[in-house]
Amino acid sequence: MRPDPSRTLQGVGINLMTNVMAEVKSPFGQQTVGLAATLSFWLAEEAERGADRLVTENRVTRDILRDGLPLAGDARAAVEAAIATPAAANFTISSLQAENDSLRRGLIDLHAAVESNPSPDAQSMNERIWAELVESTRRRQFQARI
Amino acid sequence: MEAPLAKYLEAKLPAENVRVTNLSRIPGGASRETWMFDATWGGDGEEHAQSFVVRKDPPASLLETDRETEYAFYSAFWNTKVPVPRMRWLEPDASIIGGPFFIMDRILGCEGSTRATQAPPYLAVQAQLAENMYDILGAIATFDWRGSEAERVAEAPTVDTAWRKELDHWEGIINAQEISPQPLIRAAIRWLRANPPPPAQRITVVHGDYRVGNFLYQQDGSIHGIVDWEMAHLGDPVEDLAWSFNESWWWAKDGRPGGIVEKERAIALWERASGLKADPKALFWWEVFCHVKCQGIWITGARSFQEGRSNELILALVAYNLINGQDQSLLRTLGRLS
């Protein structure tokens, strides 16, 4: 739909900050308008990137789980179950998020298994998981600041 | 809410013709709704006036804490070296103003916002603010809680179990509240269990949310009220010190705790005031723990909003910003993100 949802939400935020804020008298009301504006800016970013962020992360996480399965030890069944998570049936955020939740549950199990395993392969996988966790926070970072 | 509050005060003071004016909600307060109001009354031939604050339980919040515990910790410190507002009434009846609540005297003439500490005229007194902040934290750590209201409501751990009690508590909250898996916080929890801190030097009152933003201050850098005791408990005093260092309260975004003091200076002030040592191993453990605790709070708020139990926008904002921000802070503490 045009204008793009992200641009529309950006417009909502700008209106709240410039037009509405000045009309609100109470400190609590001003805080609420400020929160709504900030959320609008962030949602504008998320509307544009959300599906891509989840598709990317689901692919990367699934690859880690597959590669880490031989090192999963007692967590093997849990990791196998995560790998067996069906790919999201469509590109709605809720479907992609459900897939992401299942895969990241498996990632926690794999991480716990390899971090307590001193073998070089396990430690290499441990570092790969940490790198992915760092990257996952970058994917979620918003550019608009409070 | 004015009319039921006036009626309530008439019964509690007791007094006749209580008038409630200037009722307004205080911004912030993502756990309990905090309102301030003025009351006047007569009845004994004189006119009386008093400003009050009411803390009311919302339907859902960042935290689901026991208001009786908060009230008891406030009461324990009344008329001590730790400045707190005077508690007046604790009311469990939710029908009066739409939720259980308690009322305290309002401390007048003070600033409380975090933003003000970063601008004139308060910018010039940051050093005094910091000295007073950590002096008072030392006073909390030396407070004899035995026989006080705090002992009545809080279970004391031993010096060996203080860390485990808190970690169990907050891991339980995360287990119950998380909407999505939290791989980073789970890694932190595993590390905390595998690397316990040294025993606490003593068991003290722990404020639980001691930071810039939870005290009332004036232009000379003096502090006149420590507020928000809803997470207060008995435990290891290093927890409060570590909490005050959390990156979530680096208001100047320059690495200084609270945006007002260098970390080393804060440690020296606290050690002087408390007579305790900030053992680096213990402090680091509690700093990592504080990321877990923060995440427990943010996640609880996110779930409240997601499930529609609250429409407070602060909960959505916290979920969108602080859950990921806390993960990044944890990574920096662990040396995995610069």
Image (cartoon, rainbow, N blue to C red):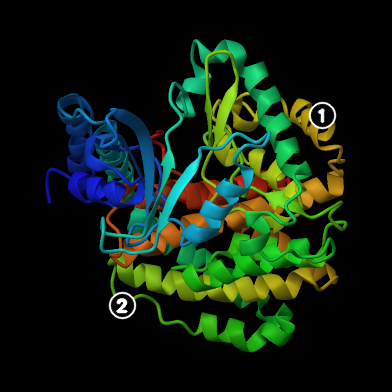
B25 lies above or below B164: above
A45 lies above or below A146: below
Front in this rendered view, residue B269 or A59: B269
Q: Quadrant of residue A41?
A: top left
B227 lies above or below B121: below
Dot 1: chain letter = B
* Residue B250 seen in this snapshot: yes
Q: Residue tagged by mark 2?
A: A89
Q: Position of residue A69 (x, y in %)?
A: 66, 80
Q: Quadrant of the C terminus of chain B?
A: top right
Graded by Cα atoms within 10 Å as few (under 14), some (14 to 19) or many (20 or more), the crowding at tag 2 reads few
Q: Quote the CA–CA distance across marks 2 and 1.
A: 58 Å
* Residue A124 seen in this snapshot: no
Q: Residue tagged by mark 1?
A: B268
The circle drawn on residue A22 is none
Graded by Cα atoms within 10 Å as few (under 14), some (14 to 19) or many (20 or more), the crowding at tag 1 reads some
B197 lies above or below B176: above
Q: Position of residue B277 (x, y in %)?
A: 87, 40
Q: Give the residue drawn at x 20%, y 33%.
A: A16
Amino acid on which disc 2 is placed: Ala
Q: Give the residue drawn at x 23%, y 29%.
A: A17
Amino acid on which disc 1 is placed: Ala
Label 2 or label 1, whichever lies nearer to me, is: 1
Q: Give the residue drawn at x 34%, y 57%.
A: B58
Label 2, secondary structure: give it.
Answer: loop
